[in-house]
Image (spheres, grey):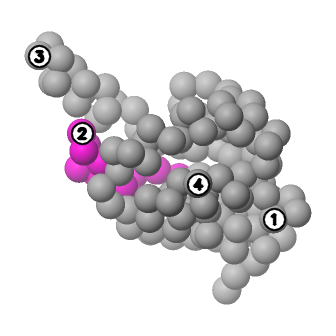
Amino acid sequence: MTSPALDVALSYHRAWTGKDFEQAMTYVADDIVCHTPGGRLAGAEAFRGFMGPFTKILTGSTLLSAFGDEATALLMYDTATLPVASAPGAELMTVREGKIVELRIVFDRAPFDAARETAAGS
């Protein structure tokens, strides 16, 4: 079963995991507020600076579950990236007029930190 917010969330997710980040950005409001493990980001350009580099290291993604209603959607997925083979994550989105206006991203940064340390020879 789909809903307006879930339709937007799934379209956004398919675009960025399919390596079409510019298409993904068409679902993002100019004034998006994004809550990441590293802190709060405000505006589409700040969001682009956070999410764009991640899409460049993405090698695969599996959608595990998706739920939504009129205004919110929740996706859980597992991604594979160049430095980390399994990086599960979840996104809670608030959608208004077909655009994501707020996004809360949850993922474990520890595997990425460990991969950076290994690459640096620590």
| Residue 87 spot, x, y in % from top left | 35, 48
Relative horizontal placement of residue 46, taking residue 82 as reference (left or right) = right
Name the secondary structure under disc 4: helix
- Main SS, magenta region, reads strand
Q: Which residue is mark 1?
A: 98
Q: Is 66 in front, or is 44?
A: 44
Kindly identify which numbered label has been placed on residue 83: 2
Measuring from the top left, give residue 106's x and y in whole percent. Answer: 53, 43
Specify whether residue 53 is in view. yes
Judging by the rendered image, the residue that carries numbered circle 4 is: 22
- Which residues lie in the magenta part? 76-90
97 to the left or right of 120: right
Q: How busy is the neighbourhood of tag 2: few (under 14 within 10 Å), some, or many (20 plus)? A: some
First reached walking from the N terminus: tag 3 or tag 2: 2
Instruction: Name the side, left or right, on which 54 lies relative to 34.
Output: left
Q: Amino acid at mark 3?
A: Gly
Q: Is residue 62 magenta?
A: no
Kind of residue at badge 4: Glu
The quadrant where residue 57 appears = top left
The reply to whether callout 1 and callout 2 are in contact (CB within 8 Å) is no
Residue under circle 3?
121
Mark 1 neighbour class, 10 Å CA radius: few under 14, some 14 to 19, many 20 or more: some
Q: Relative to the observer, which residue lies in front, 114 or 98?
A: 98
In the figure, is residue 10 to the left or right of 54? right
Q: Quadrant of the C terminus?
A: top left
Question: Disc 1 to disc 2, how far (Cα)?
Answer: 33 Å
